[in-house]
Amino acid sequence: MTEKYFGKAMKRVEDPRFITGAGNYTDDISVLGMVHAAMVRSPYAHATIKSIDSSAALALPGVLAVLVGKDLVDAGINPIPTGWLLPDLKISAHHAIQPHEVNHVGDIVAVVIAESRAIAEDAVAIVEVEYEALECVVLGSAALAEGAVQVHPEAPGNLAFDWAIGDAAAVDAEFAKADRIVKLQLRNHRLVPNAIETRASLAEYRRAGDEYTLHTTSQNPHIHRVMLGAFIMGIPEHKLRIVSPDVGGGFGSKIFQYPEEVICLFAAKRLNKPVKWTARRSEAFISDAQGRDHETVAEAAVMNDGTLLALRVDTIANMGAYLTTFAPAVPTYLYGTLLNGTYKWKAIHAHVRGAYTNTVGVDAYRGAGRPEATYVVERMVSTVALELGLDPVDVRRKNFIQPSEFPYQTPVALVYDSGNYEPALDMALEKLGYKDLRAKQAEMRKAGKYIGIGVSTYVEACGLAPSALVGQLGAQAGQWESALIRVAASGKVEVLTGSHSHGQGHETAFAQVVADELQIPVEDIAIVHGDTARLPHGWGSYGSRSAPVGVSAIKMAANKINDKAKRIAAHLLEAAPEDVVHENGVFHVAGVPEASKSFFDVSLMAHLAHNYPADLEPGLEATHFYDPKNFVYPFGTHLAVVEVDGATGKTKLIRYVCVDDCGPIINPLIVEGQVHGGVAQGMGQALLENAVYDESGNMTSGTYMDYAMPRADDMVQLEIGHTVTPSPHNPLGLKGIGESGTISSTAAVANAVIDALAPFNVRHLDMPFTPEKVWRAMHSAKLAEAADD
Amino acid sequence: MAKVPITLTVNGQTTTKDVEPRTLLVHHLREALYLTGTHVGCDTSQCGACTVHVDGEAVKSCTMFAVQVGGSSVTTIEGIGEIGHLHPLQQGFWEMHGAQCGYCTPGMIMSAADLLQHTPNPSEDQIRHGLEGNFCRCTGYHNIIRAVQHAAQHMSPQRELAQAADD
Ligand code: FES
Ligand code: FES
């Protein structure tokens, strides 16, 4: 028997470099003659640029150039396009260096290139920019209000788009039948993704071939090549190589096309020198695309027994100053379509308006639209239970889509591929000891101690597909993935994948799949990613697509290798290919295992082609471009337990149980790691994190001293379980797991906090649940009394 | 800006380099000595990605100028172990999947090494508290805790043996 790798908790093959400090991140790379860029950024949220005087900066020894917006425009550099178009979308040009007007604090107005980073940063401080400050607007609803300041002339009333999904009349009809209407007003506040590695770029230009190489912190190097090459800079794609080496986390923020890559490439050619830029954290806070930022009114029509009838949702999505790469898709197709959750709503209608504001652009952040949707649905279902005096678990169970009902057509376009929600719920309840904990909670309340149990039974949609469908929805990109498997003469295997790993462990998990398929040792396989000069075109990693789409492509390519290998083996065994079996790591004629050919024998002969089938091409290499038939729909139950301190209002997560179903698990170590990190980010939103802008558009939480990210002592050890419900439509049944934790946990923790506050008649509070906010809620009755006195 | 010579012993090797007085230790390590295992994650001394040991104590190397540590002995992630001879913490991070993107990992390991020096058998709470100065955005700290526990388990017998030999 050959070893089976699928399902094994294999230690990661990428770790030796990470644990010894040998990782190779963009900022670790230095080349001869390299110079450094530093950006001059607007301190105003909205202003016109009157003049720029760079003479003092240029006089500083070591400063090589100061480039402004006009330099790029004059050279024919186009604005950065939006990669997802909705009907009647209002797009305002986003220039890498804004020539006339700035629209958020951090917008780039000039770049200094100097011999060292320190000199470049010194020079930034003395580039004299004269601004005429304009009024600004920072909140989505304020931007859409009558008489609001106009951010862009192209978008009257600051309305970037007005989008709806679902059957409004059907919703009205259900509302007319309902015993009760439950209403919630929710703010899903803004977040900063905060990968610990900040963005960086190193651009090189070679005059000899008129060629560019860009090392950059990217989740999807080919998307950058298309955008930079074909749309922005007019560089033929075959003259532009994008390398995304080790990347220190992405969470969505490294999908997008940012100005700095354009600037570095432009400057590299202009100065004929390699140009490096690495963001400071303080720059990241005002230039990395941010997440969430919804204001929502949701209403549910329900019966007194807890039956859910219909859901009506109205959301204002703050898009920030520019529509970045996939921004329009996030609060629309990735949000409105997921408002069904795991329940049998008879009708749903969602209306979403995208608002321009003078803030950093908002785009996909881990979960992208789906955490926002899950927050609405799961908060709503728990509120329904609270108002009806029912257990939130019972209401969920009563309304679950049943296993026999898949594929399930929701009222908001999606067709769920497979699911079995109750076993995951039951396993989670069992792990938590739900009944006992409820009893304990009641006891504790008598003693003046407040714990809360939060439930979230989520479903998510990942691995967007097929390409033709996402094209109809407005994507300016395909959503298939590529795999190229190249077998060397010695039987060693290179797997080139369009999926990019920036922490997800692809080099291990993908190799496990290939090792099983080709029946070879995992050590003989290298996973190659992140370099457009080596890979076929691929679309990269986001939206939890690497397993369902990327691995499926690899599996299909492996099938092709096996088919060809079998023909070569058959020739060597002097047998018909249909009589040859591939088992235990060798090829032999069925029933005659004594005479066999190894993978090495076949690989070698594929290269020598000495004793070889006449009608077969030499070589052993196969490519597959896999375009899935549908999304995949992972699901599960998350249960959070928090304790609220009555004296201080401080909320502490004390237990967290989750049971996720992402189909068959390639590597449990990696899958659980994804869940851990996702849960921490989701709980971070609920309890800690908040991107706060003041009225002038300054981000007042723009450092790690002000923006509270979860630290080790904010978290608990998670209690994790799995159920396995394969996807019926991809070859290994895989579903994604990269975002589930974030998608589900924010709602679970929020529900736990509100549950803890039930004795104080708190029905809803907006996140994040800071001690002051919680304390005020606990004492509001007393505070009101005091005010009356 | 005028440069001044500084002599440092880094991972056992003594070198003298001319540096600008304003050069941070982390930049000196990364850019002059090409020890890029020590990372930079912030500009406010909050993330711990830059943690190294100076004369045996963990410090955030972005909070010190290179000239402040002249004559000192510095250990970076490159100096605490290597493939074949991993430090128990490196082994722990590998066994327990304590690294995802790997960016925080060197700083985490260096901070944890300091913790284990002072607290050889830390409780979960002590580990969480000890690593409070280090951000990780990928792991939710779950496997980092387990990695440190793994290391503590594998280090203490070694220590006891060493101690027994000393006695
Ligand atoms: S880089 Fe030193 S603490 Fe963040
Ligand atoms: S492993 Fe990515 S930041 Fe810790």
Image (cartoon, coloured by chain):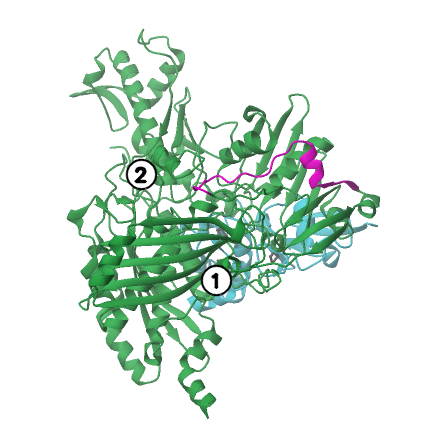
Residue A66 drawn in magenta: yes
Q: Specify few, some or many for label 2: CA neighbours under 10 Å numbering under 14, 14-19, or 20 or more.
A: many
Which one is in front, A5 or A496? A496
Q: Residue A260 in the image: x percent, y percent?
A: 62, 42
Report whether A136 appears left or right of A408: right
Q: Distance between the residues labelled 1 and 2?
A: 34 Å
Quarter of the view holding residue A5: top left
Span highlighted in magenta in the image? A63-88
> The residue tagged with tag 2: helix, strand or loop?
loop
Q: On residue A641, which mark appears?
A: none
Q: Mark 2 lies on which chain?
A: A
Q: Nearer the N terminus, badge 1 or badge 2? A: 2
> Can you identify the residue that label 2 sits on?
A5
Is residue B146 at least partly visible in the picture?
A: no
Q: In the rendered image, which residue does mark 1 sit on? A: A710
| Left or right: B107 as drawn, with respect to A397 | right
Q: Which residue lies furthest to the front in this view?
A: A147
Using the rendered image of the protein, determine whether residue B163 is visible from the camera's viewpoint.
Answer: yes
Ligand 1's quadrant is bottom right
